[in-house]
Image (tube, rainbow, N blue to C red):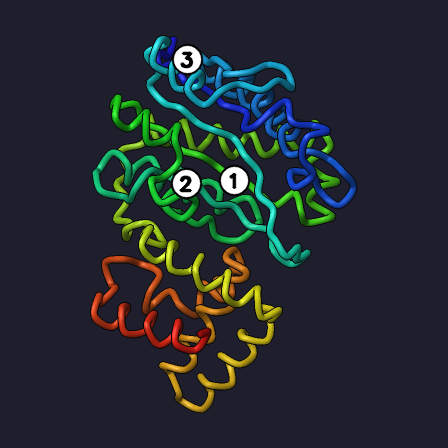
Amino acid sequence: MNSKHIILDPGHGGTAGKDHFRQGPSAEREEWINLRVCKALKLELEAKGYIVSLTRRKDVHVDHQARVDFAISNKADLFVSIHHASCDPADPEINFPFVYIHNTVNSESKSKLAGSFKQELSKAGRGEALIYSDHWVFETGLFVLRQLEDKNIPAILTEFSFFSHPEEEQRLKTMEYCRIEAQYLAASIHNYFSSGEQYDLSPSKFPFEYKRQLNTIRDGLKEEGNVWRHYYLEAQKYAQEDKFQDAIISYEKALSLNPYHPNIMEQLESMYVYSKNLKLEEHSENLSRLLDCIW
């Protein structure tokens, strides 16, 4: 019998009728998908001998602090928050897995946790799984991940796919597909606890200072009524002309308006995405030029 106690956290809950941004093109809601996947994942993990508890079993609201307290009181060995993503503006071409960890990959344990999920979720046929710092969402990170790290409880938030993708939304409505997703997630968790494999991961993407500046840029660009595709094509043109600084500026404008587009991130990856490769003086100069272009 495996004595590891895993807390599964179906993201959100109890907001139907209160918001419309967590629903797909045919109105399937993220919190319903999250719960279905968690129920399937619970069975997968219990079959492997793990002890599993859920923070909610119905479509009800559960306070963030209550989720933290639940994990602490149960002396969790791992906390996994299950979510699904959407992009704004909606783009039916965007559909890939990613995970959030608190702060950055700054320890062997966090590297193993993030690496296990990256390895297994990349096998799901949705492209390579990406690892993000939760500073990409909020400057101080995600509340639950931050609080649990303070209590030395390993925690990760998964976004297996995009429910804003029309075909993916239809798949996610079925329990059969949710069980397939649960199998990849179960393999990720089992890998974390049982594998001796070590992962040499770069620090997770997008330091919070960068995200804060991108938010400022995004606000300025939206006021002008511009769209990300214009800047993306402009960047490609500059790159072909070997005008690399101008290309970077245009790519970052596109990224600020469409932060989940994998092609934009791929173009910037070698220069700005990984904080260990970030030359601060170049980064500061680049953002300054970018802001000058807006105002």
**Gap between marks 2 and 1 measured at Cα:** 8 Å
* SS at circle 2: strand
Rendered image quadrant of residue 266: bottom left
> Which residue is drawn at the image coordinates 22% and 65% (left, top)?
280
Report if residue 194 is visible in the image.
Answer: no
Q: Quadrant of the N terminus?
A: top left
Q: Is residue 254 above or below residue 139?
A: below
> Which residue is drawn at the image coordinates 36% and 53% (left, top)?
205
Q: Which residue is mark 2?
A: 100
Q: Is residue 232 above or below residue 28?
A: below
- Mark 3 or 2, nearer chain start: 3
Q: Which residue is mark 3?
A: 70
Q: Which residue is mark 1?
A: 159
- For the residue pair 194 and 272, the one nearer the viewer reads as 272
* SS at circle 3: helix
Please state which amino acid type lies under the numbered disc 3: Phe
